[in-house]
Image (cartoon, grey):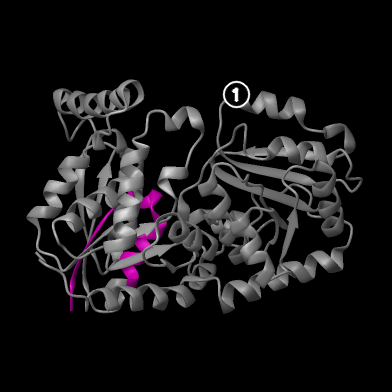
Amino acid sequence: MARICISLGSHLCQSPRGVREASALAAAGHDVLLLGPIFSEQHAAEDQDLIRSVAWRYRPTLDLRPMQSTRVERFIMRGTRRVGMAVVKYTGIQLADSLGYGIRKNLRLVESLPWDLHIGHHEIGCWVSFILARKGMRVGADFEDWCSRDLAPEAQRKRPLRLLRQCEDYLLHHAAHLSTTSHVMAAATQRAYGGQLPEVVYNVFQWSDRNSIDNLTLDRVDKNKPSLYWVSKVIGAGRGLELLFDALRSVQTPVEVHLRGAHGEKIAAGLHSKFPASHGHRLFLHGPLPAKQLLSRISEHDIGLALELSQPASRDLTITLKFFHYLLGGLAVLATNTSGQAEIARSIPDAVVLANQESSHDLASKIIELVGNRQRLSAAKAAARAAAKARFCWEQQAPILVNSVERALLRNVKFVK
C-alpha cells in the first residue's frame, strides 16, 4: 500500500476527475489523501455529502468561509492573488500567487505530510508537483486542461504563462506519472515539450451512476417534440449558442431547446430575443443542479449539444465532461468538429454527429438528420448507451489510471518523503 496525496485547485464537487481518481486508487488498496480549498458554504455542503461514503481521506488546504476565517485572513489571501495577477499583467514577473488562492499554503501543507506520490490537478496542483519534482520527489500530474494554452487573450494577460510552460515542460520530462483527457492532447503536449507521452484517461463517469436515474420528466414539456440539451457552469456568449440559434432557423421540425447553467435576467432576456421561436421551436433555461441530480435531467432529452470552439487550443484538444455525460445519459451527441470531439466521433460514428463549428448551415443539416428521422435518432441514442458501457465509463478507464500510478510508484527518485 502506498501513500498518495492529491492536490486540487477547487472544491471536491467541482473536481469530479480528481474525486474519481482518489476513489480508484483507494479501491486499489492505497492510502489516499485529497487536498482542496473551501470557498463557499453551498459547495462545502456538497463536498461533505460527497465524502460520506468514500474510502479516501480529505483535508482542506484553506477555508475562506466567513465562519471559518477572519476578515483579515480573507483580505490577505484574496489580496495576495489580486496583487500577483496585477504584477504578472503589468510587469511580466511570473508569480505563482496569481494561479490561485493559498497556493504556497498548499505547498507547505504537502511538504509537511508523509507520502510516496503527489499528484497535482489544476494549475495549483501542477505547480506544487513542479516544485516538488525539482526537489527530487516522486510526483505526478493530470493535464485536464492545457493550462498555458487555455482561456481568452484578455484573461491570459493576468496569467504567468512562462511559469505554466516551465511547469508543463519539467513535468513532461520528470514526473513519474502523467495523465490527460485525449490522445490528441497527449500528442500535442509531447510535441510542444518532448519528454513522455501522457497516459490518456477519458473524463468519463461511472456506468453505475445510471442506477440513480429517477425516470422523471421535469424539464421537457412536449415529449412529441425532439429535445436538444446543453449544459455548462454558466450560460453566456461564446459557447456556440449563437450558431445553434442561427441553425434552427433552417430546421422545420419544431424542437425544444433546454439550456442549463447559471444565468441572470439580462442573459435570459438576450437569449430569448435571439431565439427563433417564430419557427415553432421553444427555449427553456434551467439553473445549475447538484452533480448527483444532473444525469437524471440529461436522460430526459434526445440530443446532447457539445458546441465547443477550437480556440483556445486547450478547448480544441480536450473532451468536456458534458460530452461523456450525454453518452452515459443515452443521448445522441451533436458536437462541433474540435480535435478532441472528433477523436471520439471516429470511434463511435453511430452515436456522435460532427458539425462544422463555423457553419450554421452545416449544423442545421446535422440537426435535421437527427430530428427528421426518428429511427436514426433512436439508433444514435442506443449506440451512445452501448459506447458508454463498453468503453466510455469510469469502470473501463480506472484501470488505465491505476496501472500508470502503480508503475510510477516503482520508479526511483532522489528523495521521497
Q: Amino acid at mark 1?
A: Glu
| Residue 415 percent coordinates (x, y) | 10, 66
Residue 44 placement, left or right of 5: right
Residue 336 within the segment the image draws in magenta: no
Vertical placement of residue 120 versus 81, above or below: below
Residue 178 placement, left or right of 219: left
The residue closer to the viewer here, 303 or 306, is 306
Residue behind mark 1: 265
Residues packed near mark 1 inside 10 Å, few (<14), some (14 to 19) or many (20 plus): few
| Residue pictured at 47% horizontal, 59% vertical | 191
The residue closer to the viewer here, 182 or 16, is 182
Inspect this view and state whether residue 10 appears: no
Residue 279 placement, left or right of 49: right
Which quadrant would residue 4 be assigned to in this image? bottom left
Vertical placement of residue 21 versus 9, above or below: below
Which quadrant would residue 198 be assigned to in this image? bottom left
Q: Secondary structure at mark 1?
A: helix
| Residue pictured at 36% horizontal, 46% vertical | 165
Q: Which residues are magenta?
A: 1-24
| Residue 355 percent coordinates (x, y) | 75, 52
| Residue 131 percent coordinates (x, y) | 19, 51
Q: Quadrant of the N terminus?
A: bottom left
| Residue 373 percent coordinates (x, y) | 88, 62
Residue 13 within the segment the image draws in magenta: yes
Which quadrant would residue 275 be assigned to in this image? top right
| Residue pictured at 51% horizontal, 63% vertical | 182
